[in-house]
Amino acid sequence: MRFMKKLIVVILIFVSCSARSQFLVEMLDTTHNEKKGLYLNLKKSDHIKFSGYMQPQFQVATAKGIDSYSGGDFPANVNNRFMLRRGRIRIDYEGYTDNNKPSLQFVFQFDGTERGVAIRDFWGRVYENKFEMFAFTAGMFARPFGYEINFSSSDRESPERGRVSQMFMRTERDLGAMVTLEDRKKSNWFHYLKVDAGFFNGQGLTSPADFDSYKDFIARAAMKPFPVSKNVSLSAGLSFFQGGFIQTNKAVYEMATVNGVNIFTVDSSESNIGKKAPRRYRGADAQVKMKHGWGSTELRGEYWFGTQSSTKNNTETPALPVNEPHYIRKFDAVFFYIVQDIVNDKNQLVFKFDWYDPNTAIKGSDIGKAGTNFTQADIKYNTYGLGYLHHFNDNLKLVLWYDHVKNESTSLTGYTSDIDDDVFTCRLQFRF
């Protein structure tokens, strides 16, 4: 019986958040010798925190078997489905020095759905405490590029991230090492600045292992929410990505102007094999939050542009070596949010605009013309998202969301007009 009582106490403490864990430890009666030993063992885990969330959802598409970035493609004969979009459990450990300064952090997070179980985060961070300005992170963690990439799926209003971030940085994480500059003393304006910079394999969780020796350098300089006035705060960031992957095919297609017409031209030099297919992205983002009598209004904008290398029929970053011609395209993309509280933060209306143009050198009417080598991978997409969120409490949230996806009209068979590929999502999020 005594053993069972101790076991119950241990379980309660380890599945609680850190604050609750601390409370339970302090509530133990250490004047009793038998309980005093248990207290000392539990004290070692004071800074362990368990958290998690689950997102079961029902979706309806306007046609069967559509390609979709609203939770993945629909099977050929399916236009509605139940799915467990995410099921995350995360464990954090935080270590402190004798004078209560952070010394290290360790994080492990996995995702479990009907499609299987996979690691999402597995990293450690070491803090420097002489200047209280630097930290070093290594392992599997989110790439420090842009705002939406690092915005947790449990907090983000839209069910999914933008199309371009899903295509270029699927699963958001990668294996690498990063240095962070951030003033933890908060003694002057400098503590509003945060800079992350690191090197990463490039393939992230989409590949079982790195397949070349090229590494991606990624950096972001950000201003944390700054109080412009009593009711207005502003934050912003600049992002930099310089990388690429090995070319395994000698044929490389790039844009050129021939007789006044923009087309893909090919370079088939043998020396192309082994070179780096470029991935060069630049980004800028800003967020403004305004408080008023109707709750608050938040505006978020993010712009990406640069160069992406992929294949003829796809602009996603390859997960494995691709022994087919490489296509290099100039792209740009935009994410824009309007988040409006309705009287209070329990009810929110959200509008999102997501624009991805994979080939900025051409127009839709050019795609499909003979001799241009343009395909469906060069088509621009605009996604208009509209949603209602209701927060029942801190642990339960309802999301009702509709994505209207519009592709540009082209001369390509099957894409001469807008494809019927809208998706409605009804989601419940359980969180602890």
Image (cartoon, grey):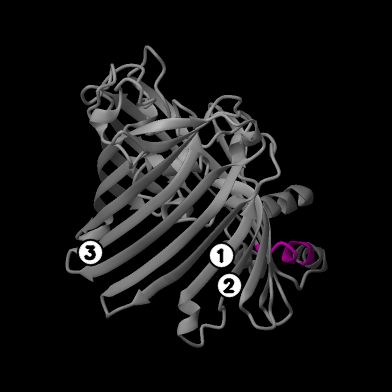
**Where does the magenta region start and end?**
40-47
Q: Are marks 1 and 2 in contact (CB under 8 Å)?
A: yes
How far separated are the C-alphas under marks 3 and 1? 33 Å
To which residue does mark 2 refer?
181
How far separated are the C-alphas under marks 1 and 2? 7 Å
| Residue at x-position 61% and y-position 28% | 249
To which residue does mark 3 refer?
295
Can residue 384 be seen here? The reply is: yes
Say which of 132 and 292 sits in front: 132
> Where is residue 147 shown, x and y percent of the image?
42, 57
Element at badge 1?
Answer: strand
Amino acid on which disc 3 is placed: Gly
Say which of 365 and 343 sits in front: 365
Specify the farthest residue to the top: 77
Give the answer, above or below, for where 178 lies relative to 184: above
> Where is residue 384 shown, x and y percent of the image?
24, 41
Q: Earlier in the sequence, mark 3 or mark 1?
A: 1
Numbered label attached to residue 348 = none
> Where is residue 198 shown, x and y percent of the image?
62, 59
How far separated are the C-alphas under marks 2 and 3? 34 Å
Say which of 307 and 229 sits in front: 307
Quarter location, residue 424: top left
Say which of 297 and 18 sits in front: 297
| Residue at x-position 38% and y-position 22% | 81
Q: Are marks 2 and 3 in contact (CB under 8 Å)?
A: no
Numbered label attached to residue 196 = 1
Element at badge 2?
Answer: strand
Q: Is residue 43 magenta?
A: yes
Specify the farthest residue to the bottom: 187
Amino acid on which disc 1 is placed: Asp
* Direction from residue 4 to residue 277 in the image, left or right: left
